[in-house]
Amino acid sequence: MLYISTRGDASRKHFCEILLEGLAPDGGLYLPETYPQVDAATLESWRGLPYASLAFEILSLYIDDIPAADLRALCEKTYTEEVFGSKAIVPLRKLEDASTGSARTDVYLEGLSNGPTLAFKDMAMQLLGNLFEYELARRGEELNILGATSGDTGSAAEYAMRGKKGVRVFMTSPQGRMSPFQQAQMFSLQDANIHNLALEGVFDDCQDIVKAVSNDLAFKRKYKIGTVNSINWARLLAQVVYYFAGYLQATAAGSSGKVSFTVPSGNFGNVCAGHVARMMGLPIEKLVVATNENDVLDEFFRTGVYRVRGSADTHETSSPSMDISKASNFERFVFDLLGRDAARVADLFGAQLSKQGRFDLSGDAAFQSAARRYGFVSGKSTHADRLQTIRDTYARFDLMIDTHTADGLKVARAHLTPKVPMIVLETALPVKFAATIEEALGRLPPRPAKFEGMEDLPKRVTLLPADVALVKAYIAKHVD
Ligand SMILES: *Cc1c(COP(=O)(O)O)cnc(C)c1O
């Protein structure tokens, strides 16, 4: 399997060549040349496989430069009951059979948040940590990961890379802006290869500094700077697996029926993995994109207009991991939507977005058939919806859900198809967003035992002004 860029770069690359890279050299994103097809018989044969084996079957369709035995070992080392809390790894829980007209429709939650940092990002990041360590050892190289986080990504990256050979993490975050739980999660790590840099500024300042350092090519080369942001193809690929796992749990043997998924979305990484699964032949009826008040994606799927917001128009909400103004993985879907016309994608995401901050596909036949051909529909949820959904779920099912998952569940209920199971992806546990849970329910969410007393542990964090030169100096000092 070879990989191409959404903007038409002529080189075709193998998996391990793009594993440690972010953007393609032409500014595009990597996608496989074709989507491997999984027929009904193969899908049936995967029923009952342990999650790690299912991951191996799917990943091996996309990775031809890691020997099969090694890839299987990497999957088995990653997806363990010990790390993800259950044998199923992504357990499905039935909430209700909602009435849709005269029929009933089962609504499920797929638990993706039982990994080390209690958010779905662990599903991909834990694999990435093992893949990075494997590939760097094979090459005899080192990598220094520089990132910016407002919460979930940074902790997932640190817990995936802690103690890994050949990798250091330098994670910037806006000082005092993460939730106390998120800060404690990151700053209590004592591993020598993890560096927390709390910058005096907001998240955008952190991101600007990461960009400035990455744009200094001499520095980047000398200090082997890399990233693990959500455009990384390996992260997206790892996420494809739980769509298959969700399908296999929600359907009976030999049923060959369809299911739908609802995905709380920000950067379009999670739901893009659902798109890939559907393109491989997984019987998915709808992919429902759920947004919060930051509704760039909902606006696109309703109107065909993609309009990037400025930071002034990006709202701070109670589902903060979806507070994005620009969906960094969206280009991948648009590439497929437009029949893989790379020149057009380059024009839309290069010229048009940088000049006008928007593009408009409303008149395009491809957009008009997006729902029919690709299953995409969307909806939006607000703070009031979130509180209401958290309350209702607690009252009816004795279950606390987090704010992002609540956005998903709210939007899912508007898109039920009679008799087609609806699977809502649970993207975090409520303890990460305790303040809003307390606002909704008047009580705090339970805290898993392994996080008791976390705030009292010694903290490893360096406070710095938001200054590129100082961040570079810190990296240089800790790499040499
Ligand atoms: C990252 C994140 C999201 C958004 O996922 P994307 O892949 O960026 O669309 C949603 N919910 C939670 C809890 C997250 O951490």
Image (cartoon, rainbow, N blue to C red):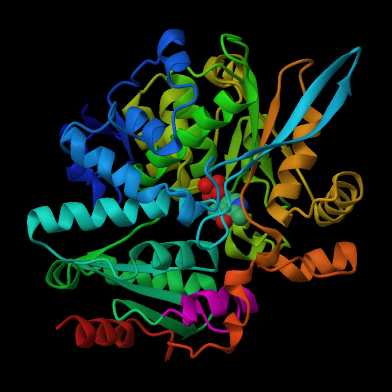
Image side of residue 94 versus residue 427, left or right? right
Tally of numbered tags: 0
Q: Is residue 21 in view? A: no
8 or 323, nearer to the observer? 323
Above or below, comparing residue 200 to residue 397 in the picture: below
Above or below, comparing residue 329 to residue 140 in the picture: above
Image side of residue 380 versus residue 155, left or right? right
Q: Quadrant of residue 371?
A: top right
Image side of residue 9 versus residue 156, left or right? left
Q: Is residue 184 magenta?
A: yes
Indicate the position of residue 131 as horizontal and vertical percent values. 26, 50
Q: Quadrant of residue 14?
A: top left
Give the position of the C terminus as an image quadrant: bottom left
Identity of the residue drawn at 48% across and 39% down: 330
Identity of the residue drawn at 54% across and 53% down: 85
Q: Quadrant of residue 5?
A: top left
Above or below, comparing residue 26 to residue 241 in the picture: below
Q: Which residue is farthest left?
A: 140
Q: Is residue 319 magenta?
A: no
Give the position of the N terminus as an image quadrant: top left
Indicate the position of residue 13 as horizontal and vertical percent values. 17, 35
Which segment is the magenta one?
173-189
Indicate the position of residue 345 as horizontal and vertical percent values. 39, 32
Q: Is residue 104 in view? A: yes
Indicate the position of residue 472 as horizontal and vertical percent values. 27, 82
159 or 408, nearer to the observer? 159
Identity of the residue drawn at 32% across and 57% down: 129
297 or 13, nearer to the observer? 13
